[in-house]
Amino acid sequence: MLAYPTVRTSFLFLAIALAGLLVADIAITTSNPWQDLGRFFLGVATPNFFSTEGLFTALLRTVAFAFVGVTLGSICGFLLALIYRFLPVRIFCAFIRAIHELFWALIFLQFFGFHPLTGVLAIAIPYAGIFAKVYSEILEQADPEPARLLPPGTHAFAAFLYARIPDCWAQLRTYTAYRLECGLRSSAILGFVGLPTLGFYLEASFSQGQYSDAGAMLILFYVLIATIPLWVRPRLLPAYVVAAPFFLGEGLPIVWGNVKRFFTEDIIPSPIRKGEGLAELSGWMSDLMINEALPGIWNTVVLTQIALVATGILSLLAFPLISNHFGGPVRRTSGHIFLVIARSTPEYILAYILLQLWGPSMLPAVVALALHNGGIIGHLIGRQTNTLQLRPDAPTGFARYSWELVPRVYHSFLAFLFYRWEIIMRETAILGILGIYTLGFYVDSAIQNIRFDRAMVLILITALLNIGIDALGRHIRRKLALQTMPTC
Amino acid sequence: MAEFDFQGLTASFNGERVIGPLSFQVHRGDHIGLVGKSGAGKSTLIRLLYDRLEAKAALVPQALGLVNALPVFHNVFMGQLDRHSAWYNAVTLVRPFRKDREAVRLLLEELAIPEKQWAPAASLSGGQRQRVAIARAVYRQAPVLLADEPISALDGPMAQQVMAMLTKHFSTSIVAMHDVDLALAHCTRIIGIQNGQIALDAPASEIAAADIATLY
Amino acid sequence: MSNKTFRKWAAASLLSLSASTVAIADTFVFTAIPDEDETKLVERFRGVADYLSEQLGTEVRYIPVKSYAAAVSAFRNNQVQLAWFGGLSGVQARRLVEGSEALAQGVEDEAFQTYFIANTNTGIEPGDSLQSMADDLKDRTFTFGSKGSTSGRLMPEFHIREAFESAPEDVFSRVGFSGNHTRTLRLVEAGTYEVGALNFQVWEKELSDGNIDTDSVQVVWKTPPYPDYQWTIRGDVNERFGDGFKEKVKQALLNLDDPALLESFPRSGFIPASNDDYEPIRKTAESIGILD
């Protein structure tokens, strides 16, 4: 078996994760975690939909921010996709998507404050970078023959409109719809930093132990996401897009002087701002690197590697839940529900809940990341096994799982996993805001101490780390000849 | 006087020459049937000629190059995208103008698929798809037709009808085909390709099916 | 999406943005650091908003924020003109906004304290100084409140550093930031953390309301007094809301005598304060390196 490069790579990553476990801080620190978990599930089972007057407004705002942000992001991403072949554009897009929505929100909060633009841009900017990449991949896959056959002298715009777009349209639409769902998740968690979306109230109810209120919010959120196919109709879409900006809430007015101040003063490293010279700057920088950046990077990488392998294991365990090759309809239905809930809940919310229940350590983060990402990959792999035809006398049970199915889907499983590597790292960094000592912790601390110069350097480091992992992930996928559809 | 003078046509694939060097002339009014066994280099030659002729030629490649997601009308209309402004084309994508609809419908009637005008290309059978690609080439209104097995999926009478239509709409044509009888019936000149070289070049009236059989 | 739809969208969004700007241009907006449970804050400051609105004759609005830094930023960005800050956040805010001043503080804020609390399972006994409790405290798990809190972070960290001559991370086996005082109390009570530090007023109020399980958690050390919470106002409010506005706000705060409202802070009343009152806080913050 070890002759297969895919198997060798898997074992290498497994070994790294196990080594990571030795140095990682994995613990349940609460004295009665299961009792709290029980109270939480009781809360979900007895939801209270009418406690917060703001609940339905928050839901509306969540949808509005998602629509405006994703629309703006998809338009900009589409335009960027047209010029994606230029290296500077690719670098720019890699950079803007390497910074998490919450980090963008924290940045914009500093100068736009609680204006709707903060939330809209926090979603639109990273999404534009992601859309640009995926759209350009989709457009590249289009059959080039029709374009070659067009009469010479055809306007480039018309050629694009007729020979490129129609073939890609279905895929573009599917992907954009998928991103809209992601946008709802992003929009919801923006509430955790103070925007008027669901996360705002979720955080408030949770931290006060009002689990029935929190349960109501989570249930409404799942219903919102699960019913997307019902209420997001192509015909209704223009109406939504036009109406959404009106439901963002009024927020507080922008003071434009703040924007200038942020870029010309706040983010300039303080030794330069105070004119203290280069010696001071290098001292400032090395202090930042040694005390914050390096520990942050170390914890982020360790947690990412553990979470990646945990995600892999969970995906492999979870895909039979929805596979036609096992069990009956009842089991599969509950499997579907489990996976839908796992993948609809943003990692951030899952991690937040588990942190409240189990206390602070890397464990809640690992479980949250594995549940969310494992839910996504398990769903995709499970669906893939449903297209497989086994011979009539194929073995059943565990033999079927291990001999017939896993070998057939292992390639795409690894492809999805390495595709999500960068995403897991981006989330890992952001979970620091919740108190796990990853890069996000130090970014949040810098912001709490009103030291935006430090925060910006740390965010830049986070972005570079993500870009590095993205490149490494692509390299491994290429080496192992793993292909993914961009709709993962 | 030759209308088109092709000199020194060559093509290589993986460092191996598959075509030429070969040269020939085409006169206005020539309807050339390109014959030869598969792999002889007919498709490559059609491509080479298209690269030389560009705007003067309409091409029907073997793979047809239809945009599957678009209706038949738009696939045909694409033959004239260069004649309209970008906004005209953009509007047509959403809502075609009456005169274009009419022109395309007439062509489709000639090809016996008028009822398919608004069907997506993806939903058509192989023979229908070939006729859409032919309609696009005709709609293009170029002086020369280059076609690579354009009627391979059409049954007898329909193949006859389409070949007749092509010679009517194009003053000059070069059509690669494997059906020798059809080639003899509809072309004025036969060029036989063997191992990337011209093995036979004669007026259709002067040769018989048996002469061509030696190529295979 | 077609061009047309986009233009419509752009126009609509511009319209909504400008409309929102006009709507609240003349509203006097204030915020407060989120040092306690949100429901408590909203209840408390809605009351203050109504009171101020009545006293000042202008529309007054309270906006809740999710972090101390967000309160400071909103103040700095002139999106709020008045704020109920802690000692440290007030110092930060006034450093960033020229002309801003501390208007009033609670009677209790002149001599504020931090309580170190411990879960009773730890067996930690109350002591007179942190040094004397060193053996008990070392390698415990410990939680601060918010990262930007005076009573929940700055002062306890200062005293820990002074007593142990090392950073909290080196003294305790695990150091966390609970987010606010109520949560610190709940986490130590539940045993999630063995030791914590919180605002003494929150402790006393929760205690008198009967919300503390005294069998599970007890106070083990009290810091020396220091100045804390205060109302801080921007220097440019008179230009925007009319001459004498700042003074009117100050008088309104000093005159606040609604017992229910005062009880919600909880403070027995408000007294004048000045920027200089908070010099000790600034020096402490600089000494432990959270202020440049």
Image: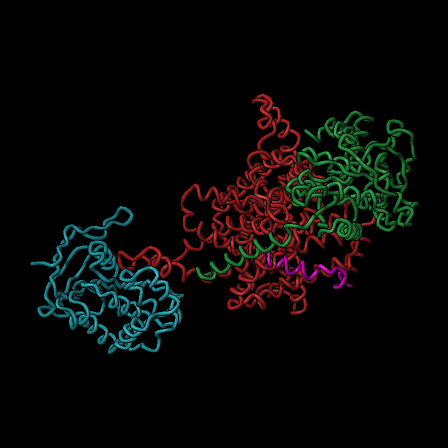
Please state if B84 lies on the left or on the right of B123 as rendered: left
The answer to which of A55 and C178 lies nearer the viewer is A55
Image coords of residue B124 (percent x, y): 37, 72
Residue at 89% across, 47% down: C212
Image coords of residue A211 (percent x, y): 77, 57
Image coords of residue B89 (percent x, y): 34, 63
Taking C159 as reference, is C265 above or below it?
below
The answer to which of A146 and A378 lies nearer the viewer is A146
The answer to which of A156 and A225 lies nearer the viewer is A156
Please state if A240 lies on the left or on the right of B137 as rendered: right
Taking B28 as reference, is A296 above or below it?
above
Q: Is residue A63 magenta?
A: yes
The shade of chain A is red
Residue at 47% across, 48% down: A481
Residue B13 visible here: yes
Taking A404 as reference, is B209 above or below it?
below
Residue A402 visible here: no
* Residue A47 in which image quadrant: bottom right
Query: Count the marks: how many?
Result: 0
Residue at 58% across, 24% down: A275
Image coords of residue A251 (percent x, y): 64, 52
* Residue A215 in which image quadrant: bottom right
Q: Which chain is green?
A: C
Q: Quadrant of the C terminus of chain A?
A: bottom right
Q: Tell which residue pokes out farthest to the front in this image.
A: C243
Q: Tell which residue pokes out farthest to the left in this image.
A: B1
Q: Which residues are magenta?
A: A44-64
The answer to which of A361 and A188 lies nearer the viewer is A188
Q: Is residue B184 magenta?
A: no
Please state if B194 lies on the left or on the right of A194 as rendered: left
* Residue A250 in which image quadrant: bottom right
Q: Which chain is cyan?
A: B
